[in-house]
Image: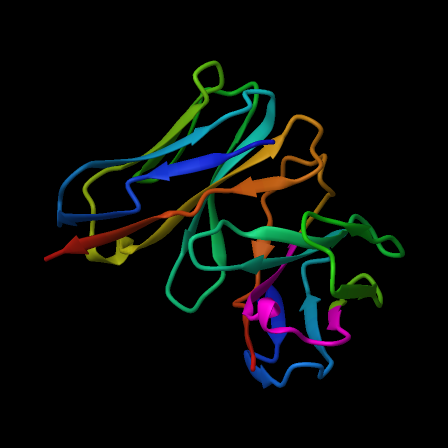
Amino acid sequence: NAGVTQTPKFQVLKTGQSMTLQCAQDMNHNSMYWYRQDPGMGLRLIYYSASEGTTDKGEVPNGYNVSRLNKREFSLRLESAAPSQTSVYFCASSELGLWGNQPQHFGDGTRLSIL
Amino acid sequence: KQEVTQIPAALSVPEGENLVLNCSFTDSAIYNLQWFRQDPGKGLTSLLLIQSSQREQTSGRLNASLDKSSGRSTLYIAASQPGDSATYLCAVKDGTASKLTFGTGTRLQVTL
């Protein structure tokens, strides 16, 4: 099983450029999440989608937008990239939303550098 | 605001040792606590999830305990192996279930 697939795996952008990070899961999960991981800090939630058709802000949503395209896919867009957005981005999914006691399943991450 | 701390940040042990990783959190009103493993360049893999009403969970050589009143959880790894080398993260889901708060992890190296 592929689980959670993220594309691309690596990307270098210039300040001000835009791009979309793609995420797809094949586990028929209802909820999907976007996190960023920075050195010396724990993972921080950017946005999440409790179910198809809904999205909500997490802890650090500024500078990002998301789209829950369908049950399988949840994309993260940087409209005007800034060096502070250099990070490793992880997508995750879970069977139920935040009220569930099911674990989250993670993709392998997208390593994004903004010059 | 929930804060999650993992000490030590790094740990090196010889193969075969039993070891304990620590996780502490500041707000005891949690929904659940999860332990994850992260290999270099990879995403997180869920190891154990302890619901707020539980005291411990076991999976193979792994045992996780939870003491909400003291704001602590431990991950016990028995008979460590080189393949256990990874970073171990704990994450707490707060009582309102609005978010997971992650610790910064303990990087474990098991040497031959």
- In this rendering, the count of numbered labels is 0
Horizontal and vertical percent position of residue A100 = 69, 36
Quadrant for residue B42, please give it: bottom left
B67 above or below A42?
Answer: above
A18 above or below A74?
Answer: below
Q: Going 74% across and 76% down the picture, which residue do you hit?
A: A80
- Please say which color scheme the image uses: rainbow
Horizontal and vertical percent position of residue A37 = 52, 59
In the image: residue B57, left or right of residue B18:
right
- Residue B70 visible within the image: yes
**Magenta residues?**
A76-93
| Depth check, front residue: B67 or B26 | B26
Q: Going 59% across and 73% down the picture, which residue do you hit?
A: A83
Horizontal and vertical percent position of residue A73 = 76, 67
Horizontal and vertical percent position of residue A88 = 53, 67
| Depth check, front residue: B18 or A20 | A20
Q: Going 77% across and 50% down the picture, which residue do you hit?
A: A57
A67 above or below A115?
Answer: above
Which of the image's four quarters has the N terminus of chain B? top right
In the rendered image, residue B37 lying in the magenta stretch gets the answer no
- Residue A32 visible within the image: no
In the rendered image, residue A90 lying in the magenta stretch gets the answer yes
| Residue ranking furthest to the top | B69
Which of the image's four quarters has the C terminus of chain B? bottom left
| Depth check, front residue: A29 or A43 | A43
